[in-house]
Image (cartoon, grey):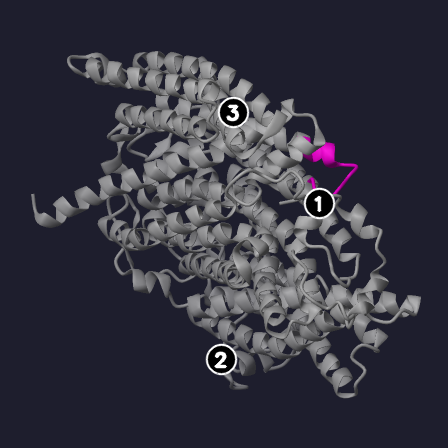
Amino acid sequence: MFDSFDAVLLARIQFAFTVSFHFLFPAFTIGLASYLAVLNGLWLWTKEHKYLDLFRYWTKIFALAFAMGVVSGIVMSYQFGTNWSVFSDKAGPVIGAPMAYEVLSAFFLEAGFLGIMLFGRDKVGPGLHMFACSAVAVGTFFSAFWIISVNSWMQTPAGFSIDPETGQFMPENFLEIVFNPSFPYRLAHTVTAAYLTTAFIVGGVAAFHLLRYRRKAEPVGAATKTMFSMAMWMAAIVAPVQIFLGDMHGLNTLEHQPAKVMAMEGHFESHPDGAPLYLFGIPNQSEQRLDYAVGIPKLSSLILKHDLDAPLDGLDTIPVADQPPVGIVFWAFRIMVALGFGMLGVGLWSLWARWRGRLFDSPWLHRAAFAMAPSGLVAVLAGWVTTEVGRQPFTVYGLLRTSQSAAPLDAAAVGTSLIAFIVIYFAVFGAGTFYILRLMNHAPMYDEPSLKDITEGPVRAAGISPAHEDRAHHPQDTQRGE
Amino acid sequence: MPLADGISFDLTLVWAFLIAFAVLVYVILDGFDLGLGMLFASERKRDDRDVMMNSVAPVWDGNETWLVLGGGGLFAAFPLAYALILPALYAPIIAMLLALIFRGVAFEFRWRTERWRRVWDIAFIGGSGVASLSQGIALGALLQGIQIDKAARTYSGGWWDWLTPFSLTVGVAVMVGYMLLGATWLVMKTSGDLQERMRKRAWTLGLATVGFIGVVSLWTPFLQEGYYSRWFEGWNIALAVLVGLAVIALAAMMFRALHIHRHDHWPFILTLGIFALCFVGLGVSMFPYVVPTEVTIYEAAAPYKAQLFMLVGACVLIPVILAYTAYAYWVFRGKVDPQAGYH
């Protein structure tokens, strides 16, 4: 059945599929873990009940997303060996150690304190519970630190030599390996993306409920207002920071992986006196040209070189065998950038509405925020595709080709497991996403039930009207046991 | 031998022990919650199932992290072994990963739905069973040896080489052993009728486990010449007899604790002892090979610099991990409260 397929291509599809699915969960939970730690801290500090309600509300969603992240992550730690054994043998001496550090410093920290964070508030007291919340948040950041370091080393390898006998990459200096040239930029850009992803999901859920309160002409709950306000502050502050970080990351890529930037820009031809910024075009790699190109003259040189007339090389300086697939990189990049500016727009709009005192009374802003709820997830995937497909045709950039990295597998074996992954991921994670959406469908209410109280699932929550939320200033505004 | 080589020699051994330790901790910790998952099948009452799941809900995630450390550690410390073993065990490994997905999400999903609760209960049972079976098959397939092309540094066998009567037997043995761990865990964590049933189950499962240990132990030496000479030649046979007697003694103590003294904790602790002994026996069979009997730990080892870099972190972090893992277990100690709801 798979005889006509190339085993390496199937292995690539399988890795792209499993890692993309996996990446969605940490992209959400990295930001959400920090948000929960902040909410819990605000609750302990101010004793305003709405923070505890929000903590409980998002903890239930976090538990689901985190579990899906864990189980899809275990798959990743074995995929290197099952499908990319030659790569593992050759690069293992260098990247194995940072990956082991990820397990030791991040996964255990998250897993060890997750139980206490979710279920332990009255067993350990508020101080230790707050510590557990922070430990989980820090753990998610450590995890990003190490895995982005490994990924960056594959993009911009440093601090190694090559063993002439075995062809293995041998570590020479781990400081250079971990802090390789693209690592600081990629880490800042990726972690900020995770924060934005969470901000837009939180903001989107809040906007959805603001619109619903409005339609039902009910007073808006305090918790809903708070989460919309917090999310919009994040959007307004972090989106411009992210665009700046993305620009820095792009300049770093131009320095170390010029072919990737050429593909992102659609520059098949070299431009000796200023390159245009193409807004649209259909990359035609077999003819090595951009069809139907619409561009702004010299703008690309201005962005990349800060000089209108700076020369920029094109893909005509790169052998065809060493070029990444231009079409995918070109379009993924444009999707990411467009969403980034869309986020900036929502952030600025919210500032305007806030200044006018209409933050909770601007239905079109709420519609926009609701529509942009998944924008972070899509942008993260698009950015990931840009950088990973842009690294092709290499696994270790410039040194080890993807075609020479795969395990000695039959197409039938890879194809069968690929189908199993696709079917099971869509079924299981589809169900999980459905449960998350169902939780989001209820507005956070006053005295939101905690994770521990839920034995009946949404059935019990559904019996209580979201209108209870407006009891935020109820005299019984004291802590209940969780 | 120059000093530097002497040191790197030792680090390889240190890493072999560390990874063996991680795998042992994984087997023990995830062993009881996978076993508990299989025991779900026989406990049909909703309340009993809730209590069973609540007894592991706060810790299962940490338990499974040891599997990531085992795999990630093998990749980091013995990259060649990782690159040879995983393609050789392709089907059982993929099956294990997919099964762990079902069983992992079931912890969260079954509380989120009434209509589909039974579906996620089945996912929990099936996922736990298939993951256990796959782990046992993988162990058996590794023990019986895998075919490699040493010059090309790749696996060179077929895609069904892992499937033999021996590997299937080890697969079933691991399922039974995990269920024993799960049953004795529940004797410790529950009370009333559920605990009483688990006491009875532990009795049968204990007998079956000892039987399987005997079968696998007697079968293993005949798989490869190296195993035979290690266990049966000269004075080594005394060691083999000693290990066998120790397993029987521990099993006898376990049965006494279970039914005569009616202890809650000791059956579980003694079962851990049986698992640790089996693991030591496994180590005796395999050492110094990581891919029996083709590649030694020294041939597969990562370079000295990588070993040293990781060891610094491991020395600091593994004691810290053990400390807060122990703390998490301490926080959720004692019997599970049947009234506590989702836990």
Expressed as whole percent of the image width and height from the top left, the position of residue A300 reads 57, 78
| Amino acid type assigned to the residue bearing label 3 in the image | Met
- CB-based contact (under 8 Å), mark 1 and mark 2: no
Residue A426 occupies quadrant: top right
Q: Quadrant of the N terminus of chain B?
A: top left
| Residue A389 vertical placement versus B235 (above, below) | below
The front one of A142 and B33 is: B33
Q: Which residues are magenta?
A: B110-121
The residue that mark 2 highlights is: A311
Query: Which mark, residue A430?
Result: 1
Q: CA distance from mark 1 to mark 2?
A: 48 Å
Question: Mark 1 is on which residue type?
Answer: Gly
Task: Tell me if mark 3 has few (under 14), some (14-19) or many (20+) residues whose alpha carbon lies within 10 angstroms of its own.
Answer: many
Kind of element beneath mark 2: loop
Q: Nearer the viewer, residue A445 or B138?
A: A445
Image point (66%, 77%), residue name: A233
In the image, taking residue A150 as reference, residue A468 lies left or right, namely: right
Q: Which mark is residue B179?
A: 3
Marks 2/3: CA–CA distance? 69 Å
Mark 1 vs mark 3: give the one in front. Answer: 3
The answer for how far apart the CA atoms under marks 1 and 3 are is: 31 Å
Query: Per the image, is B114 magenta?
Result: yes
Tell me the chain of label 2.
Answer: A
Q: Secondary structure at mark 3?
A: helix
Q: Residues within 10 Å of mark 1 (few under 14, many from 20)?
A: few
Q: Is residue B19 above or below residue B195?
A: below
